[in-house]
């Protein structure tokens, strides 16, 4: 670990932003024609995110980004907050094994809401004036940082679960 100009520490672990089109916990798998559109989606993003959280001690988590999910095209940060609330039941036990696990409160503080209805949009229609979101602002703060004391460029890597066109 190295001190930065603002007094924080530079971790030797990779800094990551997780972008996921995370559905609600009561997702209807596949969603082939039944159930409300806001619940129809593949469950693989829940599975990928839970697996990531089990390995989150190996990374410097910079952000969890809720992208447009489900057939309704809704980006819902609450879906991620719901899984983090469930993780809160076990995160103290995880820290008994490795103190590098982030707390649930730390992860909730860096969970951002993306833009709705990006799933089927052409890439050129997503970014632009008046289209900023909590997620785009969080990414802008986190992607590149320069520390003037150490001379380190702090770069974030992205891990995309699903079709995250808002990146």
Image: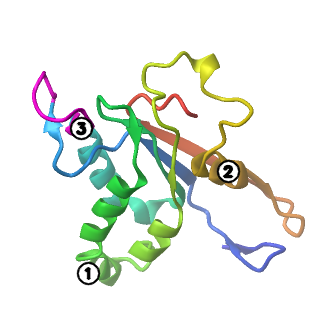
Q: Residue at x 26, y 38 (%)?
A: 38
Q: Earlier in the sequence, mark 3 or mark 1?
A: 3
Q: Residue farthest to the right?
A: 148
Q: Give whichever of 28, 87 is nearer the camera.
A: 28
Confirm whether residue 150 shows in the render. Answer: yes
**In terms of secondary structure, what is the magenta stretch mainly?**
loop
Q: Residue at x 66, y 29 (%)?
A: 127
The stretch of residues the image draws in magenta is 30-40
Q: Residue at x 71, y 29 (%)?
A: 128
Whether tag 3 and tag 1 are in contact, CB under 8 A, the answer is no
Compute the Cα span from label 2 to label 3: 27 Å
Circle 2 sits on which residue?
Answer: 137
Q: Give whichever of 37, 45 is nearer the camera.
A: 37
Residues packed near mark 2 inside 10 Å, few (<14), some (14 to 19) or many (20 plus)? few
- Please check the rendered image and state whether residue 34 is part of the magenta-colored stretch, yes or no: yes
- Please check the rendered image and state whether residue 144 is part of the magenta-colored stretch, yes or no: no
For label 3, the SS is helix
Circle 3 sits on which residue?
Answer: 44
Instruction: Tell me residue 58's x, y (percent).
Output: 45, 61
Q: Earlier in the sequence, mark 2 or mark 1?
A: 1
Q: Residue at x 89, y 64 (%)?
A: 148
Residues packed near mark 3 inside 10 Å, few (<14), some (14 to 19) or many (20 plus)? some
Circle 1 sits on which residue?
Answer: 93
Q: Residue 22: name its quadrant.
A: top left
Q: Earlier in the sequence, mark 2 or mark 3?
A: 3
């Amino acid at each position: 670990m190295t001190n930065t100009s603002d007094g924080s520490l530079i971790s030797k672990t990779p800094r990551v932003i997780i972008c996921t089109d995370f559905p609600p916990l009561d997702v209807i798998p596949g969603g082939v024609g039944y159930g409300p559109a806001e619940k129809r989606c593949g469950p693989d993003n829940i599975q990928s995110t839970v697996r990531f959280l089990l390995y989150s001690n190996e990374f410097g988590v910079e952000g969890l980004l809720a992208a447009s999910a489900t057939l309704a095209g809704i980006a819902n940060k609450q879906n991620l907050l719901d899984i983090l609330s469930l993780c809160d039941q076990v995160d103290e036990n995880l820290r008994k094994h490795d103190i590098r696990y982030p707390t649930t409160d730390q992860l909730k503080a860096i969970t951002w809401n993306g833009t709705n209805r990006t799933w089927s949009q052409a890439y050129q229609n997503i970014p632009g004036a008046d289209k900023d979101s909590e997620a785009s602002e969080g990414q802008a703060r986190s992607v590149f940082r320069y520390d003037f004391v150490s001379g380190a460029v702090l770069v974030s890597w992205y891990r995309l679960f699903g079709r995250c066109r808002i990146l």
